[in-house]
Image: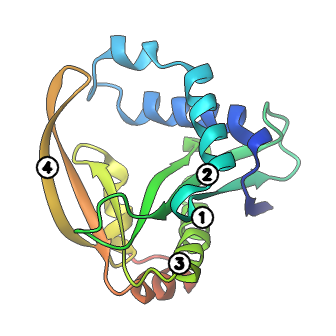
Amino acid sequence: MVTIRRARPSDADAMARVHLATWRSTYAGVLPEAYLTSLSAHQESLGYERGILERRGGHAGFVAIADGQEMPGGGIIGFITGGMSRRQAIAEGEVETLYLLDDFRDRGIGRRLMRAMASHLASLGAESAFAWVLQDNPARWFYERLGAKLAAREDMVFAGQKTTQLAYAWEPIHTLLTATATTKLPR
């Protein structure tokens, strides 16, 4: 059983561990290994704690907790953060992060986290939402399965190498709310 609840400042360390684990598995062979090993759980934790405490722009986080899991961080296996967009030109609401440990993928947990965030963004008055994702991230197709459309593409230098990030948007946001209400996602 997995429970989704609002993130608390005390969740920051576990969120940082999930963040690092997912980046290291998702981007192995894509981003430089030296960069991935240099990521600091302490720095990430401070960022999440600050974000959860400040709640600027309606910023919020939700965590997925696997009941009965013997793991550090009280069983947190994934999380999502977001709020009102930092770049209004794309959409009003923004999904800033979505991370889920590999062993818990393809179980509907990511969809449930997205639903929690979509509901939160809609409650803030956002009529549209978007998420940035690196083009080489294999999980980007998840957004398309939830009805997102490619809205922007940016070439950038990240971790010392050229890459492309993509913005996927849900316009209107009810597209995302409807897609996340279903039990299974189309493949």
Identified at 73% across, 63% down, the residue is 4
- Mark 1 and 2 residues: CB-CB less than 8 Å, in contact? yes
Q: Quadrant of residue 59?
A: bottom right
Instruction: Give coordinates of residue 42: x percent, y percent.
Output: 62, 20
Q: Earlier in the sequence, mark 1 or mark 2?
A: 2
The residue tagged 1 is 113
Residue type marked 3 = Lys
Mark 4 Cα shell of 10 Å, populated few (<14), some (14-19), many (≥20)? few
Is residue 186 positioned above or below 89 on the image? below
Q: Earlier in the sequence, mark 4 or mark 1?
A: 1
The residue tagged 3 is 184
Mark 3 Cα shell of 10 Å, populated few (<14), some (14-19), many (≥20)? few
Question: Given this view, does label 4 or label 2 mark the residue nearer the observer?
Answer: 4
Is residue 153 positioned above or below 172 on the image? above
Q: In terms of secondary structure, where does tag 1 sit?
A: helix
Q: Quadrant of the N terminus?
A: bottom right
Q: CA distance from mark 4 to mark 1?
A: 26 Å
Q: CA distance from mark 2 to mark 3?
A: 19 Å
Instruction: Give coordinates of residue 11: x percent, y percent.
Output: 75, 41
Q: CA distance from mark 1 to mark 2?
A: 7 Å
The residue tagged 2 is 79
Residue type marked 4 = Glu
Q: Determine which of the numbered discs, if any, sits on residue 171 in the image.
A: none
Q: Quadrant of residue 89?
A: bottom left
The residue tagged 4 is 154
Identified at 44% across, 13% down, the residue is 38
